[in-house]
Amino acid sequence: MMLRLLLGLFALFLVCSCQDYEEKERVIGYKGKARVNPFLAFEKFVGEYSGSEMITARSWRVMDGEDAVLILSVDMLTTKEHVARVGQWVSDGGHAIFLIDHAESRGSDWLENEEHPVVSEPLKRFFQEAGISVNDAEKVQELNTVTLEDEIFGVRMRSRTSMSYQDQKNQGLVNAEWGDGLITIISDARMLRNRFIDEQQHADVVARLLDWSRAGRVIMLRGVGISFFGLLWEKAWMVLVSAALLLLVWLLRHMPRFGPLAGEGPQNQMRAYDHHLEMIGDFHWRLDRGASLLQPLRQELQELCHHWQMKTGRLDEGLFDVMAAQSGIPADRVQRAMTEHRSSDSLVFSRAVADLQQIRKAFL
């Protein structure tokens, strides 16, 4: 009966599971490094095409003559100092590529991200001095072509920014000379992202921009936070190295020499008791300079002296005078040993203990 019941339940489950279902496949993005770095394909393209070193910087760095291209989002330059620093580097022969829409690192290429970066006023003035006008468009603009040196390239651009240069309006990519260098503004950065770099003629546009640059490193700036330790190493590396060497010399002079540990002798019960007693004495000395240790001995001496006076009929005499007469210690020392609350140092404490012990022997 139990077997029939189990077979019936199994058949019922099979019937219930035989239902129609539809399987759908949905793309959610890349895997591995491409999932966290939307410009990974561009980095590999730079290395294979130009052979230049590609560096991704997450904080502001000082550009020099060995850096050829600087790629950054427009919302990273918000101060006059940073804009002036980039402008000075470009005028010395550098190539700065500014990205506007779709330049964020956290965005997904499979989701329509409508975040629009804000171009700061110092950067707008810098663009205006170069003859470039950058304004927000009333609606999203879609461009299918860009022109580079009278050559038309097919692209796929979608942006909410309107750019004009000289007599050219509504441009998606603008180039302008600045000193000995070049300024490039790309309204839609998707042509550099993993999913879109192989579409249309995006790779050809990127290759043309790299050809216009001098030989050197390509820097992609993904953050402008100033590193305190990086700045310290850049401005004061000689002081840091000197301090480290000084610390090393001090450690070598004061650290114990290497070698086998000194063997410990056999510990017996007496040695352990002495060590315990020493620790107790050190505790009381730190607590109240040994006053708590002298108090029991002083009370015992008062009782011994009082019994001796009663026994000899000399209750009228002073306590300290009797102790001084019996022990042979001057009265002022007896008074200090019996009344001083805290000893100024260990020598005074030792002398007081010795005087109290001598007085005790005189009454035993």
Image (tube, grey):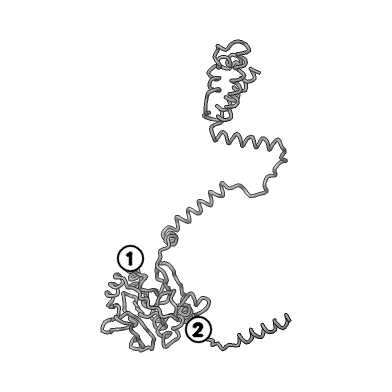
Residue 267, position as x, y percentages in the image: 71, 40
Residue 177 visible in the displayed image: yes
Q: Are marks 1 and 2 in contact (CB under 8 Å)?
A: no
Residue 362 vs residue 245, the one in the foreground: 362
Q: Is residue 136 above or below residue 293?
A: below
Q: Which residue is mark 1?
A: 81
The kind of residue on which mark 2 rests is: Arg
Secondary-structure class at tag 2: loop
Quarter location, residue 205: bottom left
The earlier-in-sequence mark between 1 and 2 is 2
Compared to 241, does 1 lie above or below? below
Residue 173: which quarter of the image? bottom left
> What residue is disc 2 on?
26
Q: Position of residue 274 (x, y in %)?
A: 66, 35
* Position of residue 215 in the picture relative to residue 337 (left or right): left
Q: Residue at x 44, y 60 (%)?
A: 229
Q: Is residue 286 above or below residue 180?
A: above
Q: Residue furthest left?
A: 167
Residue at x-position 40% and y-position 75%: 71
Give the percent coordinates (x, y) of residue 56. Answer: 45, 72
User: x and y percent of residue 38 in the render?
Assistant: 46, 77
Tell me the CA gap for discs 1 and 2. 46 Å
In terms of depth relative to the viewer, which is nearer, 58 or 327? 327
Q: Which quarter of the rendering shows the C terminus?
A: top right
Categorize mark 1 by other alpha carbons within 10 Å: few (<14), some (14-19), many (20+): few
Q: In the displayed structure, would residue 125 be above or below residue 280?
A: below
Disc 1 marks which amino acid?
Glu
Q: Nearer the viewer, mark 1 or mark 2?
A: 2
- Which of the pair 352/171 is nearer the observer? 352
